Image: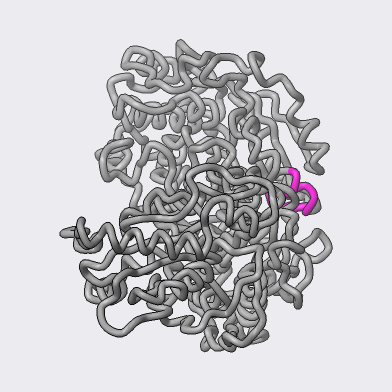
Amino acid sequence: MCASGSVTCVAFSSSEWPLSASFSNALCALLCLHSADIVQKANSGHPGAPMGMSPAAFVLFTKVLKFNPSNPKWAARDRFVLSNGHACSLLYSLLHLTGYKAWTLDVLKTFRQLDSIAAGHPENHFPGIEVSTGPLGQGISNAVGLAMAERHLAATYNKPGFDIVDNYTYVFCGDGCLQEGVSGEAASLAGHLGLGKLIVVYDDNHITIDGETHLSFTEDVLKRYESYGWHTLHVADGDNDVDAIEKALLEAKKVTDKPTMIKLTTTIGYGSAKQGTEGVHGSPLGAADIANVKTKFGLDPAQSFHIPAEVAAAFNHVEKGAALEQAWHELFHKYQAAHPTEAAEFQRRERRQLPADWEKALPHDYKPSGPALATRKTSGNTLNALANVMPELFGGSADLNPSTFTYLEKFKGFQKDSYEGRNVHFGVREHAMAAIMNGLAAYGMFIPFGSTFLNFLGYALGSFTLSALSGFQVLYIFTHDSIGLGEDGPTHQAVEKFMLCRETPHVLFLRPADGLETTAAYIAAIRHTHGPTLMALSRQNLPQNAGSSIEGALKGAYTLVDCAGKPDIIITATGSEVEIALTGAAKLTDLKVRVVSFPSWELFEKQTQEYKESVFTQGVPVLSVEAGTVMGWSRYAHASIGMTTFGASAPAPVLYKKFGITADNVAEKSIKLVEFHKTHPVAHLLQRPF
């Protein structure tokens, strides 16, 4: 040991380092132990994968990755995704060692504790973390979106001599990520698209929580990825051979027409008494084993979180990162002079600023005398109008463009030979579509959209939840939203999905009733910058309602038809059932009726109490009408017409009659509710203290 100022340093020598005599391997070993100390301090976490992947992490972060710790959001940085998010103590160690100011040693010591940025799995809200990972398979799938973003922006903005967009996306993943179906969906699309700047390092450590992978996972992963159209490599000694790891990464960078999968064979928990077993996967090593490993690697077993000066110098990336960014800015300034229009648009998108007067491009001319149109069709009109003035809109459908009307008519398809295209053919891959959209949003400069039938949100639910958790502005344009789709039957008819969306934090759920409300839905979606928006759109044609209003719809709920004085009853409905509510109300000639269109609970909750009570008047009974589960409507209504079972297969009018969602039933239930209210006065549901 030697003294260096106030810092105690390790004198590395071949006799102290059983891994090898190389300084690089010594650094890998210390990084490994640093990650184990983090888990041990918390008495919670996963030390095994961080220990096994330390050599690869050291090589990537010190020799290959382009980033600037002083500016984690530098637009031209390489992206790194830890898909096996349970290994996050490794990432947190790297962020600290390379020089991210937020990631101090004190922060690392709060791993998995309340309000710490060193959360139990990585969260994109914190510096240096691109996407939230933990649910396995998500990160590698997000990375496909990150790589697509780079390819599209490069094709759009790069000019001869000015490669202002030129970054790689690197992924660490494990066996679990590759077993999850979403990763296979995304990898298949990545191979089809030839995303050559996507490089995945697969930690082949043969262990999952249940035990060795031979219990459930014996396929040849590299052959599978070759069949997807990937370039594949294998590093047989991921525990020691840092030169081979570096060589593989550099070789992968040279393959520009295919993504690369590097199979890195490692020993989970390398150096531990439990190495190579599931026992080191999800539990701290324990004080005795940590001391044993430190002794084995020539470190002082009495010290924790110890970083010798040589190690700090070897990892620190601040000066190098600043120089890389400065060089890029110099290139961009020259680009700005040569291509001012493109540079200005690039910067606008980077700053997440919207184009001037973008709302004026949207359809505002729907009239009650106009034709009835399905909201999936008015959505298509609105999306295309918006895309013409907003180049950041980028996306497509899960093989359903003819049904969802989400094809951008003036633009090409995004393909291997046309990365400038903005129409993504996701294929029949709903889950991957949503995960890829999260990656596009994480890259920045995009507002991604995807579409399918609403009931297939169930296939995409994991990624949809992460859209919300991550605060990503993603547009879910989902159609065929109810029993109104008809003959396809209950396997395709969304019943519970409305409530699922409404009860997911940060989600803006909108169910417009006509063309103007659809325009309002897009305005609200573009304004909703810190979470996803899901639009539930009809298959069947709907009239353009008299009294319909963009301004009203943007308040979440508003009066379509009113009466003189205080109403006897308020009938409220969403989407395709607004027409039914209006027709039912017209039958109530002996009652004073107000009809309220209610496209968005979330928008309505943002209004003042005064406005809310101007719509839902104190002491007036409310009847809700919606072709979804009635659960949740007790928040606003005293009685509800809706679904209490799954749907059925038949033409839509027959189904609406079978399930009692008809104008006649609206009128009948309204009369009964008014009579009941005369003898059982109802409290006003919106008068809540919190």
Give the magenta range.
188-198
Foreground of the two, 521 or 467: 521
Which one is nearer the viewer's eye here, 460 or 290? 460
Measured as percent of width and height from the top left, residue 265 is found at 65, 25
| Extreme residue toward the left, this view | 689
Q: Nearer the viewer, residue 414 or 668?
A: 668
How many dots with numbers? Answer: 0
Task: For residue 313, say whether it is visible.
Answer: no
Queried whether the magenta region covers residue 196, the answer comes back as yes
Q: Residue at image x 46%, y 75%?
A: 586
Can residue 617 be found in the magenta stretch? no
Q: Is residue 129 above or below residue 29?
A: below
**Is residue 554 positioned above or below 207 on the image?**
below
Q: Which quadrant would the N terminus be assigned to in this image? A: top left
At horizontal 43% and vertical 79% (from top left) the residue drawn is: 560
Q: Quadrant of the C terminus?
A: bottom left
Q: Residue furthest front?
A: 590
